[in-house]
Amino acid sequence: MLLKGRAHKFGDDINTDYIISGKYKFKTLDLKELAKHIMEDICPDFYKNLKPGDFMVAGSNFGCGSSREQAPLAVKHAGVGAVLAKSFARIFFRNAVNIGLPLLECETDKIKQGDALEIDLKKGIIFDKTRNVILRAHPLPEIMLRIFNAGGLANYLRKHGSF
Amino acid sequence: MTAFKMGKTIAEKILGAHSGIDVSAGRIAVCRVDFLMGQDGTSPLAIKAFEEMRGKKVFSPGRIAMVIDHNSPSPSIDVSRLHIMMREFALRHKIKLYDVGCGVCHQVMAEDNVLPGMLVIGADSHTTTYGALNAFSTGVGSTDLAAAMISGRIWLKIPETIKIVMNGRLKKGVFGKDLILYLIGKIGADGANYRAVEFAGSAISSLSVDSRLTVSNMAVEMGAKAGLMEADGKTAAWLNKNRVNVSHPKSVGGQATCQRVNGSRRLQPAQNAGQAFPPRWTSGRDLALPLCRAGRLAGVKADADARYEKILTFDAGKIGPMIAKPHTVDNVVPLGSVEGTKIDQVVIGTCTNGRFEDLKIAAAILRNRKIHPKLKLIIVPASRGIFLRALKEGIIEAFVKSGGAVLNPGCGPCVGTHQGIPADGEVVLSTANRNFKGRMANPRAFIYLSSPATAAASAVTGRITDPRSFL
């Protein structure tokens, strides 16, 4: 599967409160509604400027903080195609795989704001068209790959009943 | 016994026992869980995922608890609807439900459900708290919780362990909170990402269990998967004092008691601590309970030749009161460098510092004093048990007379849902564990983190103040 979109750059330690503030996440299970408030506190125009399929590109420790699954869900429902970061916080990493949001752990310094990216998810290859650079992502552990390929943990459990 | 023996960390031992195989760091294992927990920010999504998975029943009702603490009591119609969803699910599946007023999930879990050697999974990042009770406990999201509610299992990567040794005597006015803030400042917000941390050394042993829980609670603020400590006589005494019933966690059909029950079995530290750990790698779901049923608390100790990713040693005697400045938890400085900063609101409570010892220290400072007239003081006991004890000992009275507002047990204003949202530009000094921009629902407010003693002293002066002048 080839994903195409523009890069939206963020720094290190983007926490789950920034991704979706606690004041919204506790209120509702309406993910379309939650998605509108994504990154609101640090980047109020992010949702407005986001085109379906665009990528979030960050530094290290993306998704640190709380265990709220609303964070990767809001990212996914806002239309983000994938998140690229140097590293992810562990709970966010699990949650994203469990809900089927593609994550790529890779070197992100070379990617700049607005770059056009093409991503081959299966091979874990990122092509920065703007800069003509190819980057490689670290592969997922096998169990996570199985869960992701099943379309998330809900599908996986429905199929297998356990681990 | 295995053919060759390799030293194990606490994490490797507990996860090995729960997976039934000999594991070491790096391996992925499917583990049986002893206890599961969700709160009102994560349980509704877990219930939704449970239904998507076509879950019919939970694996073991007595081993699952849901806690209404983050928005408690409900601040809105929408939240009330989600709370009803939790109550109905709890009733249908006969799991424990801790409703409005019982307290913060982590305190309730520590008091009621966690034992040394257990594997506990919670849909809340601060589930690392119970590492202080020698349990491997870690946070997950809602879908993982749902899958574990059905299967009783979770896959985990056996983490590498960083051993943090803190020796030395704590100076006056320095508490567990100051130690963990100092460590987070040194190690950074992702310095222990994916790792377990083992806290050891004479300074950690010297801490009360209340303080140890504070340290393990914030292990996740350096990214850690677990913040483990060994069990000792203090752990046994704490469990005896707080435990509803150590030997038989019971399902009570949707309504947990969250009250003390007398007559539970007493725990004592085992003479041969560490020996009682099963020599064979057993299927370890009930690892902890037999240890406690036997009336002895051995807990799980690391082997002397355990392999650590690194061992960091600190002198706790050199640490003074610490502060985390806005807007990250690892932005830690000695109190002196922000002393005198004007504050508008003080919060004493949360799963980090709403325990009895915390309230007692704060009350010792606030008793017969008035808070600064331009300041709001909010106090939130972490559980009903703590609240009752604080009432009985005149601690709550001291807060009320000082001008503080005492809220019901729960998360209070920590997560920005209600009960004390700051205005634009306002400065909050809180005993909580996070100070991210917008954490308390206003991205234009500033949150500093400190110990309860610092918070109480600062409430009197209206500025960030070294508590040592009040002790």
Image (cartoon, coloured by chain):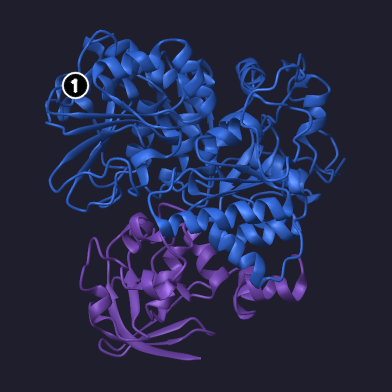
Chain colours: A purple, B blue
Residue occupying the point 71% across, 17% down: B262
Q: Position of residue A144 (x, y in %)?
A: 61, 69
As displayed, is residue B188 above or below residue B142?
Answer: above
Answer left or right for B449 relative to B81.
left
The residue pinned by badge 1 equals B465
Name above or below for residue B119 compared with residue A24: above
Question: Quadrant of the image for the C terminus of chain B?
Answer: top left
**Quadrant in which residue B357 is drawn:** top left
Q: Is residue B240 left or right of residue A100?
A: right
Residue B376 placement: quadrant: top left
Q: Nearer the viewer, residue B28 or A37?
A: A37
Residue B168 in view: yes
Q: Position of residue B320 (x, y in %)?
A: 29, 21
Amino acid type, callout 1: Thr
SS assignment at label 1: loop
- Residue B161 at x, y = what percent? 56, 42
Q: Quadrant of residue B237?
A: top right
Instruction: Give the farthest residue toward the front.
Output: B77
- Residue B228, can we see it? no
Q: Viewed as shown, does residue B2 lie left or right of B229?
A: right
Name the quadrant of the N terminus of chain B: top right
Residue in front for this viewpoint, B109 or B276? B109
What residue is rendered at 25% in x and 89% in y? A130
Along the line of sight, the residue nearer the viewer: B415 or B10: B415
Subunit of label 1: B
